[in-house]
Structures are given as structure tokens and as C-alpha cells.
Image (cartoon, rainbow, N blue to C red):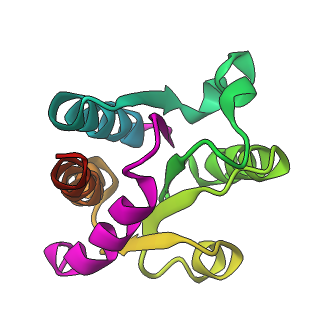
């Protein structure tokens, strides 16, 4: 099901391939997913990417956020949901235009964000396996577009 989003991810890659950097944010289990996604982007595109713990946003990374900085946020309906929503609002307040990877059943997040990538729901400790696939596809398409 996640692999069927390839066209959507490819479209996102066409919007981002000319950028110099991308920030990927998440909390809890999804922090590891952010680090993995950022590493894949660095390794195969030679593009600067950084995985950021969403709870540490005010300790430096928020200063990088503006309307030009690509931001990808992983927000799932787990014990970090409220804090991730808070981080999302901080990014938006800085004129950030985040792409949100979220649960396909999270109507609130989908309704309140223009750019979402919807993944199937799984148990919390396995959700990262599904959430990392869009980041891996993005890394692949960015690499192809960047030559």
C-alpha cells in the first residue's frame, strides 16, 4: 500500500530536488525514522539533510525554518501526537510549509495541512517501518532528478 504512493512521492521530489537542504522531524519512535530518512537522502543525493528531534526545535533548528526550507514532519497518533502537533504549529508560525507524513486515518492532520503523505496505521513500535518507505522513495527520486 505504501509503495503505491510512488507517483505522489515523485511529484514531491520534483518540488525539492533543486533545494540545498531538507529537515526531517519527528519524536519518539519516529525520531529514528527521521535519522534514517535523512541519512538515505545524504547518501544517495549528496544533498544536506538532517533528522531532528521535534522536541528540540526551539534549541536551534527552528532558526533554520522559513518558507524556503523544506521540512518533512512525521506525526502519528501515538503518545507524542500532541507534542508533534505543537512542533508543527511552530514550523507553520515561521512560515514553514511542511510536508506531513501521517496516519491515513488521521482526519484532523490531513484536513489542517495542505501537503500530507498518508501511510497505513500499525502498532507504535512498527509504524516506523511504514513511515520510512516514503522517505526512501523520496531519496531515490531526488537522486534520479539530481543526476
Q: What span is colored magenta in the figure?
A: 1-28
Taking the image as drawn, is residue 119 in sight? no
Taking the image as drawn, is residue 85 in sight? yes
Residue 87 image offset from top left, x and y in percent: 69, 43
User: Residue, x 58% and y 83% (percent of image)?
Assistant: 107
The reply to whether the magenta stretch includes residue 32 is no
Residue at the right extreme?
Answer: 93
Whether 108 is drawn above or below 85: the answer is below
Residue 136 image offset from top left, x and y in percent: 20, 51
Say which quadrant the N terminus sits in: bottom left
Residue 127 image offset from top left, x and y in percent: 29, 56
Whether 131 is drawn above or below 55: the answer is below
Residue 59 image offset from top left, x and y in percent: 71, 16
Tally of numbered discs: 0
Side of 95 relative to 145 (left or right): right
Side of 81 relative to 33 (left or right): right
Whether 76 is drawn above or below 114: the answer is above
Q: Which of these two is toward me, 119 or 66?
A: 66
In which image quadrant can residue 47 be found?
Answer: top left
Q: Which of these two is toward me, 29 or 92?
A: 92
User: Residue, x 28% and y 69% (percent of image)?
Assistant: 10
Amino acid at each position: 500500500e505504501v509503495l503505491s504512493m510512488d507517483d505522489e512521492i515523485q511529484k514531491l521530489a520534483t518540488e525539492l530536488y533543486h533545494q540545498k537542504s531538507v529537515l526531517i522531524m519527528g519524536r519518539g519512535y519516529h525520531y529514528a525514522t527521521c535519522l534514517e530518512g535523512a541519512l538515505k537522502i545524504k547518501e544517495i543525493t549528496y544533498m544536506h539533510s538532517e533528522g531532528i528531534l521535534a522536541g528540540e526545535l526551539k534549541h536551534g533548528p527552528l532558526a533554520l525554518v522559513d518558507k524556503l526550507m523544506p521540512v518533512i514532519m512525521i506525526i502519528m497518533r501515538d503518545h507524542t501526537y500532541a507534542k508533534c502537533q505543537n512542533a508543527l504549529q511552530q514550523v507553520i508560525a515561521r512560515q514553514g510549509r511542511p510536508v506531513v507524513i501521517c496516519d491515513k486515518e488521521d482526519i484532523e492532520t490531513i484536513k489542517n495541512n495542505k501537503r500530507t503523505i498518508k501511510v497505513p496505521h500499525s502498532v507504535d513500535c512498527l509504524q516506523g517501518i511504514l513511515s520510512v518507505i516514503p522517505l526512501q522513495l523520496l531519496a531515490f527520486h531526488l537522486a534520479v532528478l539530481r543526476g
